[in-house]
Amino acid sequence: MAEPKDMYQCQTSNCGYIYNPDKGDRKGKIPKGVTFEDLPDDWKCPICGASKKAFKALG
Protein backbone atom coordinates (compact mmCIF):
# COMPACT_ATOMS: atom_id res chain seq x y z
CA MET A 1 0.00 0.00 0.00
CA ALA A 2 1.38 3.39 -1.02
CA GLU A 3 2.44 5.81 1.69
CA PRO A 4 1.14 9.41 1.57
CA LYS A 5 4.67 10.56 0.65
CA ASP A 6 4.35 8.48 -2.53
CA MET A 7 1.02 10.02 -3.54
CA TYR A 8 0.71 13.39 -5.25
CA GLN A 9 -2.35 15.65 -5.46
CA CYS A 10 -3.25 18.03 -8.26
CA GLN A 11 -3.33 21.56 -6.87
CA THR A 12 -5.42 23.21 -9.59
CA SER A 13 -8.75 24.63 -8.49
CA ASN A 14 -11.71 22.28 -8.83
CA CYS A 15 -9.58 19.17 -9.34
CA GLY A 16 -7.78 17.50 -6.43
CA TYR A 17 -6.95 14.29 -8.33
CA ILE A 18 -4.53 12.12 -6.37
CA TYR A 19 -1.95 10.09 -8.28
CA ASN A 20 -1.49 6.80 -6.44
CA PRO A 21 1.31 4.51 -7.70
CA ASP A 22 -0.66 1.48 -6.45
CA LYS A 23 -3.32 2.30 -9.05
CA GLY A 24 -1.35 3.95 -11.85
CA ASP A 25 -3.32 5.93 -14.44
CA ARG A 26 -5.48 3.82 -16.71
CA LYS A 27 -6.48 6.79 -18.88
CA GLY A 28 -2.83 7.77 -19.36
CA LYS A 29 -1.79 4.12 -19.87
CA ILE A 30 0.48 4.23 -16.81
CA PRO A 31 0.69 0.77 -15.19
CA LYS A 32 0.47 0.11 -11.48
CA GLY A 33 3.74 0.55 -9.60
CA VAL A 34 5.05 3.58 -11.51
CA THR A 35 6.19 6.26 -9.05
CA PHE A 36 5.25 9.89 -9.62
CA GLU A 37 8.91 10.72 -10.26
CA ASP A 38 9.03 8.08 -13.00
CA LEU A 39 5.99 9.41 -14.87
CA PRO A 40 6.89 10.81 -18.30
CA ASP A 41 7.61 14.55 -18.28
CA ASP A 42 4.67 15.12 -20.64
CA TRP A 43 2.19 13.24 -18.40
CA LYS A 44 -0.98 15.21 -17.65
CA CYS A 45 -3.62 14.97 -14.93
CA PRO A 46 -6.35 12.63 -16.24
CA ILE A 47 -9.05 14.89 -14.79
CA CYS A 48 -8.04 18.46 -15.64
CA GLY A 49 -5.01 18.11 -17.94
CA ALA A 50 -2.57 19.91 -15.61
CA SER A 51 1.15 19.16 -15.91
CA LYS A 52 3.24 17.39 -13.26
CA LYS A 53 4.30 20.82 -11.95
CA ALA A 54 0.75 21.34 -10.61
CA PHE A 55 1.12 18.38 -8.22
CA LYS A 56 2.38 18.32 -4.63
CA ALA A 57 3.23 15.35 -2.41
CA LEU A 58 0.62 14.48 0.21
CA GLY A 59 3.18 13.50 2.83
Image (cartoon, rainbow, N blue to C red):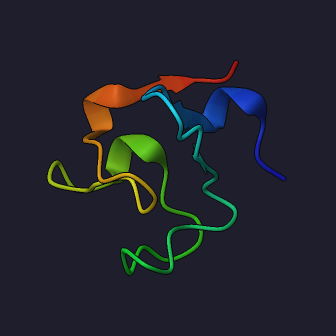
Q: Position of residue 41 (x, y in %)?
A: 17, 48
Looking at this rendering, what residue extends furthest in the right direction? Answer: 1
How many marks are shown on the rendered structure?
A: 0
Residue 16, picture quadrant: top right
Name the side, left or right, on which 9 lies relative to 54: right
In the foreground, 29 or 2:
29
Residue 30, picture quadrant: bottom left
Q: Position of residue 51 (x, y in %)?
A: 25, 41
Looking at this rendering, what residue extends furthest in the front direction? Answer: 14
In the foreground, 14 or 46:
14
Q: Is residue 58 above or below residue 17?
A: above
Q: Is residue 55 above or below residue 23?
A: above
Q: Position of residue 42 (x, y in %)?
A: 15, 54
Q: Is residue 47 above or below residue 30?
A: above
Q: Position of residue 48 (x, y in %)?
A: 38, 52
Residue at 60% from the left image edge and 56% from the top image edge: 21
Name the side, left or right, on which 56 lies relative to 45: right
Name the side, left or right, on which 52 lies relative to 58: left
Q: Quadrant of the C terminus?
A: top right
Residue at 42% from the left image edge and 62% from the top image edge: 46
Residue at 66% from the left image edge and 67% from the top image edge: 23
Residue at 76% from the left image edge and 47% from the top image edge: 2
